[in-house]
Image (tube, coloured by chain):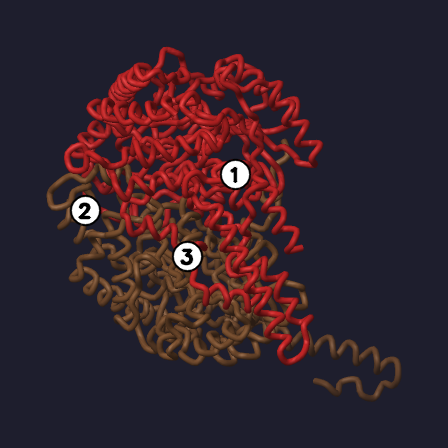
Chain colours: A brown, B red
Amino acid sequence: MKCLSRKVTCNSHGQDSSYFLGWQEYEKNPYDEVRNPNGIIQMGLAENQLSFDLIELWLSKNPDAAGFKRNGESIFRELALFQDYHGLPAFKKALVEFMAELRGYKVSFEPKKLVLTAGSTSANETLMFCLAEPGEAFLLPTPYYPGFDRDLKWRTGVEIIPIQCSSSNGFQITQSALDEAYKQAQKSNLRVKGVLITNPSNPLGTTISGEELNLLIDFVSAKEIHLISDEIYSGTVFDSPGFISVLEALKERNLEEESDVWNRVHIVYSLSKDLGLPGFRVGALYSNDEVVVAAATKMSSFGLVSSQTQYLLSVMLSDKNFTSNYIAENQRKLRERHDMLVSGLREVGIGCLKSSAGLFCWVDMRHLLSSNTFEEEMKLWKKILYEVGLNISPGSSCHCTEPGWFRVCFANMAEETLNLSLQRVKAFVESTTMNSSNRDVGARQSTRNSRRRSLTKWVLRLSSHDRESER
Amino acid sequence: MIMTRFWQNSENDEDPKSPSSGGGGTGMRIIVPLQGVVQGSGGLVLGSVIPCALFYCLQLYLRRNRSVSPPPSSSPSTSPSSPSSAPPSRSPSSGQLVEASELQRSPSNLFSRLSTGQGYISSRANLLTKSADAPYYAGPKKVTEDPYDALNNPDGVIQLGLGENRLSLDLVRDWLAEHVKDSIMGAEGGGDLSIHGIATYQTFDGLMELKVAVAGFMSQVMEGSVTFNPLQIVLTSGAAPALEILSFCLADAGNAFLVPSPYYPGFDRYIKSRTGVELIPVPCRSTDNFSFSITALDRAFNQAKKRGLKVRGVLISNPSNPVGNLMSWETLYSLLDFAREKNIHIISDEIFAGSTHGDQEFVSIARVLDSVGFDRSRIHIVYGLSKDLSLPGFRVGVIYSCNDSVLAAAKKLSRFSSISAPTQRLLVSMLSDTRFIQDYIETNRKRIRTMYLAFVEGLKQLGIECMQSSGGFYCWVNMSELIRSYSEKGELELWYKLLNIAKINVTPGSSCHCIEPGWFRCCFTTLTEKDIPVVMERIRKVSETCKKS
């Protein structure tokens, strides 16, 4: 029809990546234990469904929280009219305390520096709008969450330049990779406004080490750019090495308060992963720069959190018994699931990157590729999707530089389903091994035959003595 | 190129008087290169310190002149970029946080920014943070600091500047008291408390059940004159993102929408700040009851074209905010014709459709579309539950469109503005209770009408006239006889007096881009009947001092 905007008609929403195509296939044929046992099992969704029972228990014991009541009295009127973009004070207070608790109280947060948004999707986009002009760039270490291509770039016009990380050092960020990325941006005439890291990492599941954090802090200091730390998985750390928040790293180096870099470090958080409540759409951004906070607060008009939800969660998160128990239980369950997946894969010769956090594993299937290319990775991915019936996320969709890595989620399904998926993987690997050994035999034979044929021709061409020498 | 953007921002302000403080950062790009020019041992210091000091002093001087000490000499309120979001802060401390923006930054910070030469925050963010002192914001802030309460603070500031309806909250509260437990959880598994259904990721553009319920509610609110198709709905967390998303879909940065003025101040922020889309006011006059004419639209369209601005659509509100008039069938028909002829879109903000209180019937643009053969793909309706259901805190906005491409894009964009799932579930229950909704709509209308009539009568006794209004929460009040000079300056002087002496916060017409000075928007649905005489008495005192002088 009539002219629509370029944003609508172009493709930069990134929804055509395999990450999302896999989801679409899953939607068409979703696994159900009873109704569709041969369907596709969703292992591409980083959702935490392991600890719902704890939340349900709390809700059943605290009906007032969902019932618009405080101390038995109705506060409905107050909540119905509350649309202040500064957020419900009680909720912000409870949320920053929860964030501090997740960090072992090594750092503390101030409610006035927190801006609430409708999910971390909105927080990330808001930070881009606040910090960068269209056409400017942020550096992101690869592999990174496929959604960033959409969330950070689409409406904002901001570019992403990858900081290439490799498996040789466990995908850690190095000085040379940072410098290379910065150079790349300059070559493309893109002004770099900052670095965005996800810590703990999605899709790796690893926590960023102290050395890497220091490297990053030095880098952004020297270049006078921003550092955004997306810490939405901070509550999913179940093992050592533990999680070091970027604020903690700054504190260690006495770079608080008046230092320049202090004002250029911003944190993104959300309750979607830690509390497993993505449907509630609760995200936040935290910044020490009051101008950023002021601008982001106004922008949050475009994605305010329902007052009902804010109130409910303020009561829940203020219940310290609940939060400490939840954090511990949640971590225990995540570790169990993680170990289950890792050992199950190990049994069939598939390794995972050693990880201590997150809702997924970064799985090494390089040895299953017939050649070290992304085309082969896609072929393998499609096979796993359609033949094996598992939707996992291929590394290429996460901009990984090496083919053969896949992100496999373990926290969004029942234990039986995870077992079933491991059985399917086992069957697949076994059949692949058998096929490939058959293929090898066949390949050797056909090579021999063709060599004989060519030799025969050659021999015929030159002499008749060496005819049967290769047998 | 950066300089161009800097000056473009000033132009977009449509306010030659207020210098665009496009951020200290941008200005510094002029100064810092000077450092390189001055060579030599002392020269570097002089070359950097002197220009920086001069610039800093200039900034301070300009800001002091722009601040809202009475009366403002420049007109930040008419700056279309004046940041505009609904809510006054509820707590004084957070209210002051808003002010902790550029005006109060410490010199050391400013200087460190001067020396980095890096833009600290983007120009888009800058547009939002400046003008926190525009009347549309300064007023509500005063209310928060000293809110009126009949019992506890009878001398406090009365809020008439915020479009809230408190008249019928008791009805919703009572419904909730009976139904809330069942409505949030227990959607699956026969009443068991199950969070699975609301905790997990949902479709970003809203639950289908809620779309069905909202389509039904919209139809009920419009008295069954239109049926809405749930498949053509995208739900968002409030009407603000709905407006922004539509703007992203229908126009590119640098394009424009025509908007009959006076118009809702929030349009400026919601539509312009991040999309880069311009709003071109098409002034309406009191002699026409502030209704727009196609002639005026046509003229504005052509003028824009001459300036090289591509107009992509017309944005209307119906019932109108701030005037409160309803569009007639004929007006809507000619608007559709105009849009067809110019090949542009129409966005119709019908958020007050259920809050009509006069005798005139509300006609939705959808209804006109239904009965004539216009191309439906250029019409888009914005709606929400903040006004008609008195639930602004729940954040529910609606995009209704017949254009599949727009719907597809809006669905994807709604991921940045999704409604919280427990709230969605709750509303599914509430809106599906059609009998409750019917009672609510009727009772609410009656209460709005009663309050409207009382308010208008009270003003009449003071000799103050209002424009005839049939819908919405506002009286569009003519106080032009009370202003000293028939100008925006005079209007803002009166606004200041009303705020600080009479202690009532109203919205001056200039914030709404009204070209006739002296009109004020007063919301009467935040009041109780007992408050009206209090308000009138306070206005009377001020109006007498104005008449004397």
- At horizontal 45% and vertical 46% (from top left) the residue drawn is B67
Outermost residue, left side: A72
Q: Secondary structure at mark 1?
A: loop
For the residue marked with disc 3, what is the amino acid? Gln
Q: Position of residue B217 (x, y in %)?
A: 34, 26
For the residue marked with disc 1, what is the amino acid? Pro
Frontmost residue, A433 versus B176: B176
Using the numbered discs, state the Cα–Cα distance from disc 3 to disc 2 in whole angstroms. Answer: 39 Å
Crowding at mark 3 (Cα within 10 Å: few <14, some 14-19, many 20+):
few
**Position of B287 compared to A342: left or right?**
right
Using the numbered discs, state the Cα–Cα distance from disc 3 to disc 1 in whole angstroms. Answer: 23 Å
Q: Nearer the viewer, mark 1 or mark 2?
A: 1
Q: Is residue B198 above or below residue A274?
A: above
- At horizontal 27% and vertical 47% (from top left) the residue drawn is B91
Q: Which mark is residue B80?
A: 1
Q: Quadrant of the N terminus of chain B?
A: bottom right
Q: Which mark is residue A65?
A: 2
**Position of B476 compared to A161: left or right?**
left
Q: Which residue in the structure is indicated by mark 3?
A: B104
Frontmost residue, B43 versus B110: B43
Q: How many circles with numbers are drawn on the protein?
A: 3
- At horizontal 51% and vertical 53% (from top left) the residue drawn is B61
Q: Nearer the viewer, mark 3 or mark 2?
A: 3
User: What chain does mark 2 sit on?
Assistant: A
Q: Secondary structure at mark 3?
A: helix
Q: Position of residue B435 (x, y in %)?
A: 25, 21
Q: Can residue B410 be spotted in the picture?
A: no
User: What chain does mark 3 sit on?
Assistant: B
- At horizontal 39% and vertical 32% (from top left) the residue drawn is B495
Q: Which mark is residue A340?
A: none
